[in-house]
Image (spheres, rainbow, N blue to C red):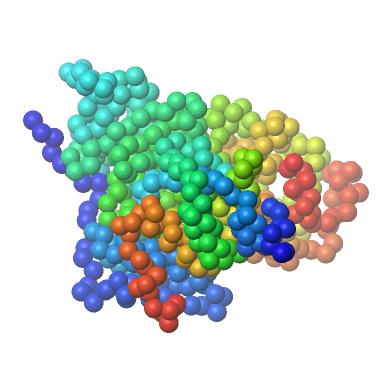
Amino acid sequence: MAEPASRPYEPLPDPPKDFTLHKALQGTKTPDGHWHVGSLEFETTKEYSDFRVGQVEMAGTKGQLATLYAVETTGHIPGAEPMNAAPAGTTVDGLLDVKDKKPDGQGFYHLGTLKVHKDELQQFADLQKNICEKNPEALAALYHMEHAPDKPVTFRVTKDNDRDDRYESDTNTIHWNPHTAARDSRNGARADPGTAALHEETHWANRGGVGDTLSSIPSKAYSDYNERAVIEGSEARMADIEGHAKRHSHHGHVVPVRELDSITPSLTVRQNGVDREAGPGFQQSGRVIGMKDGMVTLAVRGDGTEPAHRIELKVEQLQSAFQHDLPAERVLLAGAQKHGDTVTISTSNDGRIVYSDPAQEKRIHDQHQPWPPYPKEMPQFSGSPDLAERPVVPPQKADLVGVNR
Amino acid sequence: MQAANAKPGTTDLGARIEAARAAAVKLTIYHLPPGLRTLLAIAAGAIEEFPGVAVDEISDAATIAAALDALAAARPSPADGQLNARYGLIFTDAAGERILRAYKSRFPSEGQIDETPCDYEEPAFHEWLVARYQPARRNAQAEIAPDEE
């Protein structure tokens, strides 16, 4: 019996008849040089121009105007919302059941419209049980992949030397590596293998008018709006469930999971000469005023009633982190995330988070509330004689670059 | 001629392109399908090894010259930003040395020359690549009036 078709997302409503492509491309320039097209924002005229060129090149693609209308008028990115839930009573075990099935001539099991190779079935099943049990959206994705006669999908578990998780729309194939994670180069957030699988499955679900149109809208941080929809949508919701920080860009590094775990540092806080482990609930924001020998020193702003003070954070295994070419501040963030905590590190006088790329630095600055002016004189720090003797000088960016190799 | 003396590492991207003209005897174009979605953006240096990348080996002098013409006409200028590469063009000389590398994302202006992120100020390079690898795409520039910018 043929499987009934399912739909990951409801189709977008038709836009008003007077919403033409010409109208959809009209932008407004602000004094700071940014362009706004409804709720879309482009940092430069070049980026706005790229948006226009991309839309004209694909003119006529199904769903294009509906997608543009939704993005421009609602501020909501279609494809970022949760998929339609799987029917009541759907279980991951039921969806993975192959006891009455045999692989085809190429060795693939057919789970409805989803193909999984027999040699990869166990890893695929382990993945799906893991993510579906904690996230109903993952169960929905699995259900929809098995009930999609209009776009049957193949899920491949890749070999160790293929480190790039991806969705190929030409062949409708998801490639997933269980041994690698993604690390955001902007805020250090990670996308674990389970999150990565849901990321690619969401791309599959978005494929069509919405996904194609979003892919043609540039976004400096996210590459394009298709990636933004997935990273801010299903991936962010998975990060909430996992208790991890959310990625805020599409840029970063592939990190082997084994190494990622092995370099996660413990975090020791030394305040007034007393060391304590940063356990659950630890949260500290501050300006980095030193980073040496595994010790990060932050200047912590006062709250208006208490003066600013300094705090030291000792990052264990920092040398190990360096060996893996990870900047120290990101390792620190990783340690905090491991414990389910958050650490904010700033270095410059106006409160920017320091990264190696000036463009990233500017964006992060734009996204954060500025810090109050840096105090000219820090109050006496009694807990650490060594530190007290050190002049309180906000570090230059080059200082941190040197520390970070 | 000043341009002919330019070496990789100069900030004059146009000079680097002109310097490549005299010596380039081979062009290798790496390109990825437009429908590819990835967990992470593809850095310029990673495109050559990316799974499934298509490779065009070109030794025809006219095609190499046309590619350099398009690249020069695009007037690349250094810019901030990170690339999600979809095209990588490697120009090599008779000794097999890489003398120029040019990259581009799926968008017209986002690129990189050697290690320098850049904006392509004109669409010439984009149009050359689209005509070669995505001929079904419409000529967008012809349909956008300049006064709308």
- Residue A358 is at least partly visible in this image: no
Number of callouts? 0
Horizontal relation, residue B93 to residue A131: left or right: right
Residue at the spot x=23%, y=59% of the render? A62
Q: Position of residue A103 (x, y in %)?
A: 23, 20
Q: Give the answer, above or below, for where A299 lies relative to A5.
A: below
Give the image location of residue B141, x and y in percent.
40, 70
B26 or A217: nearer the viewer: B26
Is residue B133 something one can see in this rendering?
yes
Is B5 placed above or below A336 here? below
Residue at the location (46% across, 69% down)?
Answer: A48
B144 or A35: which is nearer to us? B144
Q: Is residue B32 above or below residue A220?
A: above
In which quadrant of the rendered view does residue B14 lie? bottom right
Q: Residue at x 40, y 66 (%)?
A: A53
What x and y, as percent, mark residue A253?
A: 56, 41
Dividing the image into 4 quarters, which one contains the N terminus of chain A? Answer: top left
Res. B113 image quadrant = bottom right
Q: Is residue A190 left or right of residue A321?
A: left
Toward the front, the furthest residue is: B61
Comparing A351 with A311, the one in front is: A351
Drawn side of residue A290 relative to residue B126, left or right: right
Q: Residue at x 32, y 37 (%)?
A: A173
Return the x and y of residue A281 as percentages of the image width and height: 58, 42
Name the outermost residue toward the left. Answer: A1
Q: Nearer the viewer, residue B60 or A116?
A: B60
Q: Is residue A79 left or right of residue A223?
A: left
Give the farthest residue toward the bottom: B147
Picture quarter with the C terminus of chain A: top right
